Image (tube, helix red, strand yellow):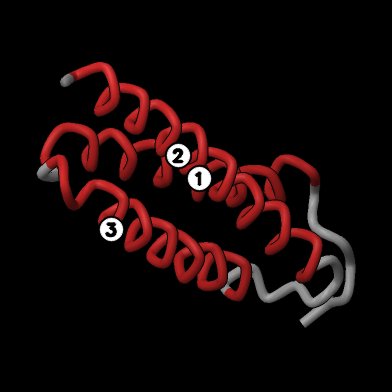
Amino acid sequence: MTDAPMTPSRTWRGIFGVWGVAVAGAILVAIFAPVGLRFTWLSLTLAACALLAFIVQLLTHQKIGFIDRLSISIVGVVGVLAVAAALLGLATLFQG
């Protein structure tokens, strides 16, 4: 195992992949979750994406920058799901 830093494209590929899973999860929650359980399912999506981010970063076998890559992944997931929660909340509010 080498301690050489990863290439930027390889670093961001894993991070964007986790963000994409968060977007897909938010869309699935918006479509399939009952109105009263949407925020519960968004919380479960957050937990699943955090575990996925941890696994993806562990699979790189690079210890340099691990905390930075994991932090960026999780902060992005929280941002994506916060926007989804706001939109779902507004949709519920104006729905009736």
Q: Quadrant of residue 59?
A: bottom right
Q: Quadrant of the N terminus?
A: bottom right
| Direction from residue 16 to residue 94 in the image, left or right | left
Question: What is the secondary structure assignment of the residue under circle 3?
Answer: helix
Find residue 36 and report its horizontal and vertical position in percent: 16, 47
Query: Are circles 1 and 2 on residues that touch, CB within 8 Å?
Result: yes
Residue occupying the point 71% across, 50% down: 11
Q: Residues within 10 Å of mark 1 (few under 14, many from 20)?
A: some
For the view shown, which residue lies furthest in the front direction? Answer: 96
Instruction: Specify whether 43 is left or right of 58.
Output: left
| Residue under the point 71% across and 52% down | 72
Q: CA distance from mark 1 to mark 2?
A: 5 Å
Q: Going by the picture, which residue comes out furthest to the bottom?
A: 1
Tell me if mark 2 has few (under 14), some (14-19) or many (20+) residues whose alpha carbon lies within 10 angstroms of its own: some
Name which of mark 3 and mark 2 comes first in the sequence.
2
Q: Amino acid at mark 2?
A: Gly
Please tell me whether residue 15 is drawn above or below residue 48 in the rendered image: above
